Amino acid sequence: MKKKILIISGGISKEREISLETGKQVARELKKNGYLVKNCEPDNNLINSVKSFKPKIIFNALHGQFGEDGYIQSILENLKISYTHSGVIASAKAMNKEISKKIFIKNKILTPKYIKYSFDKSKVELNNLIKKKLNFPVVIKPINEGSSVNVFICKKNEIHKKLEKLKSYKEVLLEEFIPGREIQAAILGEKKLGAIELKPQRKFYDYEAKYNVKAKTKHIIPIKLNKKKYKELMKITLKAHNLLGCRGVSRSDFKFYKNKFYLLELNTQPGMTKLSLVPEISAYNGINFINLIKIILKDASTNK
Ligand SMILES: Nc1ncnc2c1ncn2[C@@H]1O[C@H](COP(=O)(O)OP(=O)(O)O)[C@@H](O)[C@H]1O
Ligand SMILES: [Mg+2]
């Protein structure tokens, strides 16, 4: 009998379109390889879809809020069906950039200096806080978002204007801007998978640079690092994956400056279209798209 896989994609996050594309491409590849596949949304019909289709495994192809932050994972736990990628706690820790940075700092993983800012503070309070802790330029970013949505690099005179755009979040992070190279590294099935360097042609690796081929971001693989530095990068990546308690696949985003790796964040639901970074790193290391998906399925929780 064909193995049944239910793919959940779409959702309500700002990364909905990317998730739908991941869901579509993973479904196509699984069908080509003899699986019985159904796609669904994480909406009110989810529980009915699970009960009627009776999948062996649920493939979580969601990104961002409600899909990458522990919420959907807790529903899946409750349904007692095995699901791919990280579980409730790891997802929640990784999605929250403040919590994950605290864990990195506590465990001696370098991450850019930061402050948390809540919009009930005055401009003067903010200016004093920045003066005390950070140097300009600073990067402002939401605590629970992805795909560079609402991430801005600001000079001193721009900060208040840019912060206006993030008001709906109530709280945001302000980080010291780290110049240098943009490097991402992945873990697959508890093993070090590999790394890639991105050379955006824009101001930074923003949404357009990530998803619009016309933005012409260069992907450099194999990555140009000496053996010792590459080993160090992969060691930090595995350490971060394990510290947060991740499962299956994860991708960590770094800046590399003055010979040091700064971990920006760890993604528990990295993009999985054929053009995404994890499939690219995976293919370079000899694991094609279907085998990558199979390893992720093999690592699904045994949530029975
Ligand atoms: N502290 C920083 N210094 C320099 N660039 C940064 C910094 N923080 C974020 N960026 C840029 O913004 C991009 C997105 O930031 P990141 O923290 O990875 O959030 P997201 O979850 O949106 O991907 C990074 O890939 C990088 O190009
Ligand atoms: Mg990122």
Image (cartoon, rainbow, N blue to C red):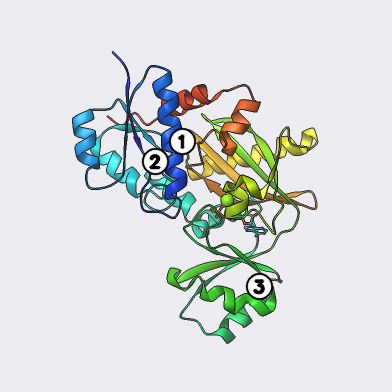
Q: Is residue 242 shown left or right of residue 263?
A: left
Label 2 CA crowd tier, 10 Å (few <14, some 14–19, many 20+): many
Q: Is residue 238 in view?
A: no
Q: Residue at x 70, y 59 (%)?
A: 203
Per the model, the C-alpha gap separating discs 2 and 3 is 34 Å
Query: Which amino acid type corresponds to the residue marked 1 in the rendered image?
Result: Arg
Asked if the residue under mark 3 is in contact with the one under mark 1, i.e. CB atoms within 8 Å, the reply is no
State the image coordinates of residue 259 (x, y, percent, origin top left). 79, 48
Q: Against 84, is 65 above or below?
A: below
Q: Is residue 168 shown left or right of residue 152?
A: left
Q: Residue at x 60, y 48 (%)?
A: 210
Q: Residue at x 34, y 49 (%)?
A: 71
Q: Secondary structure at mark 3?
A: helix
Q: Against 238, is 282 above or below?
A: above
Name the residue beneath numbered marker 2: 87
Query: Which amino acid type corresponds to the residue marked 2 in the rendered image?
Result: Gly
Quarter of the figure that contains the C terminus: top left
Q: Which mark is residue 133?
A: 3
Asked if the residue under mark 1 is in contact with the one under mark 2, i.e. CB atoms within 8 Å, the reply is yes
Q: Earlier in the sequence, mark 2 or mark 1?
A: 2
Name the residue beneath numbered marker 1: 247
Outermost front residue: 214
